[in-house]
């Protein structure tokens, strides 16, 4: 698709001619000179326009990844080849997915005959899901810069924006147990508490007498203790709220995105422990992954959830709980990722009690960061005092709701989104080591 338009220089010259035409009205003797100048300028305009129709074969290639993490700047490259026999002055604009942010996209360059150049700009994905690049638009200048020729080059490309699971990768690098504390995750050791036998070792101070293997000790003539590991082959199942309560923003990410990141990290940890992991979403598009014991669980979750977004629907906790109870035959650790709102806490409690009949339930609620700023509120003004009182009242109601959950033997967490992934993994380790499941 081609389009030719005059440049600013063309308009300036045309403006000067119009001004000269007014002047020659007062000096009739310059009429022939003015007409000659107009003819000459017209010829120059026409010849310069014809230069745009000279062969100017160029090829453009966009190099972009197939998958990128949310919020991480990604380098997009454009390769330009000049197959014509003359020098070209070009400006290039890539029609990128407008839901994302770009930096350094303005590309202006001159390229010599039979040469190749490569340009790049940074694109920062701001929304998960499938993003589409359209054509690349090129503006070529005529020889004297009186005209611009616009052309569009087909370069469609699809890019999948996944949740930023850098914390999962970070955890994978911390393979040594003593380094887990760098993430704030503490893997507690409980000798003799687990039920999965791991190995025999020398008895150490602090071991329980019940851990001693008396037959082996008698044979070796020294005390030998049994070492146990956390139970394996259990089920972890996530119930993820995709409703309106998860649309709240803290920083650049919504509560829903924070919940996905935390779920991915715990999925990685539980899979490493040998547990089967699955999930279901509700209050929007329902997606289901059956519990599966595989090291590829993180990739399985990413492929299923990368384009899922929170909706404006209200969550039906009871219906979701009933479905999980029907589908999950084996007892599991069910982690409910949502938030607590006083308008439906009774419905939530009913659903959690229903789940608790068959499973061990953890309710992980994401609270707004503003709750952490309560002590920093200014009380020097009347408005500040009102804000402080309202926030205090809401916090007290929230605390009572969590006390009600605890009294019904439901494990609950109330954490800010930025701390959810760490607290969730720590709670998982506590449950595993305490034989609650």
Image (cartoon, helix red, strand yellow):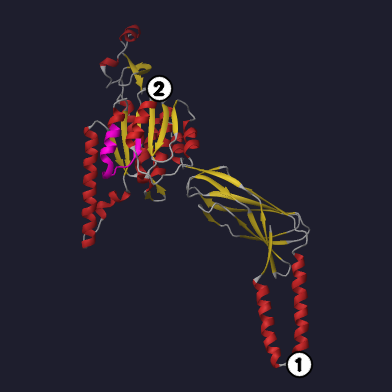
Residue 130: x, y in percent? 53, 44
- Can residue 335 be seen by looking at this rendering? no
Name the residue carrying label 2: 233
User: Measured along the vertical axis of the image, is residue 208 above or below residue 405?
Assistant: above
Q: Secondary structure at mark 2?
A: loop
Camera-nearest label, 1 or 2:
1
The disc, 1 or 2, on the residue closer to the chain's N-terminal end is 1
What residue span does the magenta drawing correspond to? 336-352
Specify whether residue 303 is painted magenta.
Answer: no
> What residue appears at the point 50 percent right and 34 percent down from the top-left corner?
299
The reply, left or right, for residue 158 in relation to residue 428 is right
Assess disc 1: are there few (<14), some (14-19) or many (≥20) residues with their C-alpha within 10 Å of its C-alpha.
Answer: few
In x, y percent, where is residue 125? Answer: 50, 49
Report the Cα–Cα distance between label 1 and label 2: 103 Å
Say whether residue 351 is magenta: yes
**Is residue 410 in view?**
yes
Q: Main secondary structure of the magenta part?
A: helix
- The image quarter containing residue 25 is bottom right
| Figure quadrant of the N terminus | bottom right
Residue 135: horizontal and vertical position, in percent? 63, 52
Instruction: Check if mark 1's residue and mark 2's residue have beta carbons within 8 Å.
Output: no
Q: Secondary structure at mark 1?
A: helix
Q: Which residue is mark 1?
A: 29
Looking at the picture, how far across and down is residue 214, in whole percent? Answer: 30, 9
Q: How many marks?
A: 2
């Amino acid at each position: 698709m081609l389009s030719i338009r005059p440049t600013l220089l063309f308009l300036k010259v045309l403006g000067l001619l119009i001004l000269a035409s007014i002047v020659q009205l007062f000096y009739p003797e310059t009429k022939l000179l003015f007409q000659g100048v107009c003819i000459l300028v017209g010829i120059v305009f026409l010849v310069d326009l014809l230069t745009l129709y000279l062969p100017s074969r160029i090829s453009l290639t966009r190099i972009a990844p197939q998958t990128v993490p949310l919020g991480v700047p990604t380098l997009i490259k454009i390769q330009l080849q000049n197959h014509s026999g003359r020098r070209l002055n070009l400006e290039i604009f890539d029609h990128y997915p407008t839901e994302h942010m770009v930096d350094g996209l303005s590309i202006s360059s001159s390229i010599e005959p039979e040469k190749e150049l490569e340009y790049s700009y940074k694109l920062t994905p701001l929304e998960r899901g499938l993003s589409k690049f359209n054509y690349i638009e090129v503006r070529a200048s005529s020889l004297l810069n009186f005209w611009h020729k616009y052309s569009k080059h087909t370069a469609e490309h699809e890019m999948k924006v996944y949740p930023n699971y850098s914390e999962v990768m970070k955890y994978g690098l911390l393979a040594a147990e003593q380094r887990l504390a760098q993430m704030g995750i503490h893997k507690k050791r409980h000798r003799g508490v687990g039920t999965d036998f791991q190995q025999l070792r020398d008895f150490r101070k602090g071991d329980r007498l019940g851990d001693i293997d008396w037959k082996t000790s008698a044979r070796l003539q020294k005390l030998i203790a049994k070492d146990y590991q956390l139970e394996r082959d259990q089920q972890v199942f996530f119930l993820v709220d995709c409703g309106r309560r998860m649309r709240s923003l803290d920083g650049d990410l919504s509560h829903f995105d924070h919940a996905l990141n935390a779920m991915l990290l715990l999925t990685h940890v539980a899979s490493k422990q040998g547990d089967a992991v699955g999930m279901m979403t509700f209050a929007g598009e329902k997606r289901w992954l059956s519990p599966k014991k595989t090291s590829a669980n993180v990739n399985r979750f990413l492929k299923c959830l990368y384009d899922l977004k929170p909706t404006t629907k209200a969550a039906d906790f009871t219906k979701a709980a009933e479905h999980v109870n029907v589908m999950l035959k084996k007892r599991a650790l069910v982690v409910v990722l949502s938030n607590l709102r006083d308008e439906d806490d009774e419905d939530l409690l009913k659903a959690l009690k229903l789940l608790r009949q068959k499973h061990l339930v953890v309710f992980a609620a994401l609270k707004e960061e503003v709750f952490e700023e309560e002590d920093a509120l200014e009380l020097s003004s009347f408005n500040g005092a009102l804000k402080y009182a309202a926030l205090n009242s809401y916090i007290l109601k929230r605390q009572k709701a969590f006390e009600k959950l605890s009294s019904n033997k439901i494990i609950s967490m109330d954490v800010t989104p930025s701390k959810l992934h760490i607290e969730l993994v720590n709670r998982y380790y506590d449950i595993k080591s305490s034989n609650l499941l």
